[in-house]
Image (cartoon, coloured by chain):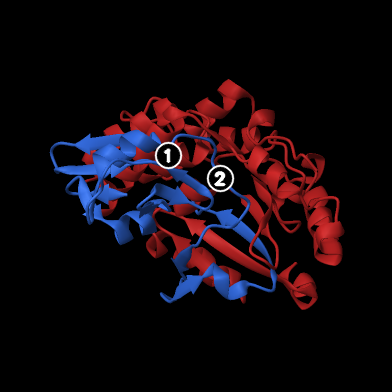
Chain colours: A blue, B red
């Protein structure tokens, strides 16, 4: 997640990181990490520290990159994450649209 | 493969990982004349969400949206990787020396397309009864570890991509370098960055490594992990 300030709204934080800020803390799936008092805006530095997310600052451009949480494994569960990507024609494609079918996802690159 | 397995309930979804998006991938997509969903991941979200570290990588997802095999090397049967080395044509003479060496080294890379696709067919036929469909905890355990240095690499790579897309290619380089330093076994971070400077991912003044040199360091046979089928 790229930010120009270390504060953002809860919906953006949830969409970009998968962590939902709730009264009981930062939650994803069945896991909740307790946080201190949190207002409507997310104090990104504080939450990042609590979840073990690295913050990279680019001083010249005045922006931060928030890395993923430091966890045991990349996949916190076997559920395929909510993911919408554009098709090459420019339409949004939601992987949930294929529920009921098996999917073989192939990642490739031209380089 | 898609024509064979789609009637049996499988959909193939291809995802192109490229910070330059359709500008770099369009000609390959056009040439393939695909009928399946063909997606563009310009922000490398698959790397972050699933732990993809090289291409091609395959992931199997069942009808309920549960991953039954996490990312692993996935070569189609109709690829050069499926041709035994002794049946490949000789390396062309007269081509660029670096490219020639890349071709020679590439032929030492281990891949098992027939075994992989046979397992995929078995899963399509047998679903959760297939011995190749992993239980959820095994999927988690087989996904890549994410210690602090790997999370830091992801943050630097995201910053580098953002700057590259925003037109600040020079400013992106230090972040790509940091990503390479923090997670040297992530070939996507390296190949994506190298390819932005030199199409053949050869040596440059801005990066410490290049494809050929880095592959030789680890041995081409270790470029992809062995399939754990």
Q: Nearer the viewer, residue B192 or B58?
A: B58
Which residue is labeled 2 in the image? A76
Using the image as rendered, state which of residue B193 and residue A23 is in the foreground: A23
Answer with left or right where residue A35 lies relative to residue B142: left
Q: How many marks?
A: 2
Element type at marker 2?
A: loop
Residue A30: x, y in percent? 54, 50
Mark 1 belongs to which subunit?
A: A
Q: Residue at x 53, y 57 (%)?
A: A81
B162 up-or-down from B213: above or below: below
Q: Nearer the viewer, residue B226 or B62?
A: B62
How crowded pointer 2 is (Cα within 10 Å; few <14, some 14-19, many 20+) is rated as many
Residue B33, located in which quarter of the rendered image?
A: bottom right
The residue that label 1 is drawn on is A69
Give me the residue at 72% from left, 37% from top. Answer: B110
Residue B20 in sight: no
Can I make out residue A33 in this image?
A: yes
Q: Secondary structure at mark 1?
A: loop
The reply, left or right, for residue A96 in relation to residue A7 is: right
Q: Residue furthest top?
A: B217
**Quarter of the N terminus of chain B within the rendering:** bottom right
Q: Position of residue B66 (x, y in %)?
A: 66, 59
Query: How far from the left and from the top, in percent, is residue A101?
Result: 70, 72
Q: Earlier in the sequence, mark 1 or mark 2?
A: 1
């Amino acid at each position: 997640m790229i930010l120009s300030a270390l504060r953002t709204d809860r919906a953006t934080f949830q969409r970009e990181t998968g962590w939902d800020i709730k009264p009981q803390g930062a939650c994803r799936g069945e896991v909740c990490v307790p946080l201190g008092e949190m207002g409507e805006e997310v104090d990104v530095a504080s939450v990042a520290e609590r979840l073990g997310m690295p913050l990279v600052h680019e001083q010249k451009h005045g922006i931060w990159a928030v890395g993923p949480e430091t966890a045991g494994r990349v996949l916190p569960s076997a559920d395929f994450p909510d993911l919408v990507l554009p098709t090459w024609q420019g339409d949004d494609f939601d992987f949930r649209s294929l529920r009921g079918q098996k999917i073989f996802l192939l990642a490739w690159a031209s380089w | 493969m898609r024509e064979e397995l789609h009637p049996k309930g499988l959909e193939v979804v291809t995802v192109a990982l490229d910070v330059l998006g359709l500008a770099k991938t369009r000609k390959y997509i056009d040439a393939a004349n695909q009928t399946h969903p063909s997606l563009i991941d310009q922000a490398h979200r698959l790397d972050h969400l699933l732990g993809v570290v090289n291409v091609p990588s395959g992931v199997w997802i069942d009808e309920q949206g549960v991953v039954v095999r996490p990312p692993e090397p996935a070569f189609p049967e109709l690829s050069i990787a499926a041709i035994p080395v002794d049946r490949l044509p000789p390396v062309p003479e007269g081509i660029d020396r670096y490219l020639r060496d890349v071709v020679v080294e590439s032929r030492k890379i281990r891949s098992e397309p027939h075994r992989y696709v046979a397992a995929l067919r078995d899963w399509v036929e047998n679903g959760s009864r297939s011995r190749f469909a992993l239980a959820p905890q095994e999927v988690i355990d087989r996904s890549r570890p994410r210690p602090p240095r790997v999370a830091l690499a992801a943050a630097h790579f995201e910053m580098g991509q953002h700057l590259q897309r925003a037109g600040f290619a020079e400013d992106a380089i230090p972040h790509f370098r940091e990503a390479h330093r923090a997670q040297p076994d992530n070939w996507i971070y390296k190949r994506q960055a190298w390819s932005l400077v030199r199409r053949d991912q050869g040596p440059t003044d801005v990066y410490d490594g290049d494809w050929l040199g880095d592959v030789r360091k680890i041995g081409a046979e270790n470029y992809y992990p062995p399939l754990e089928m």
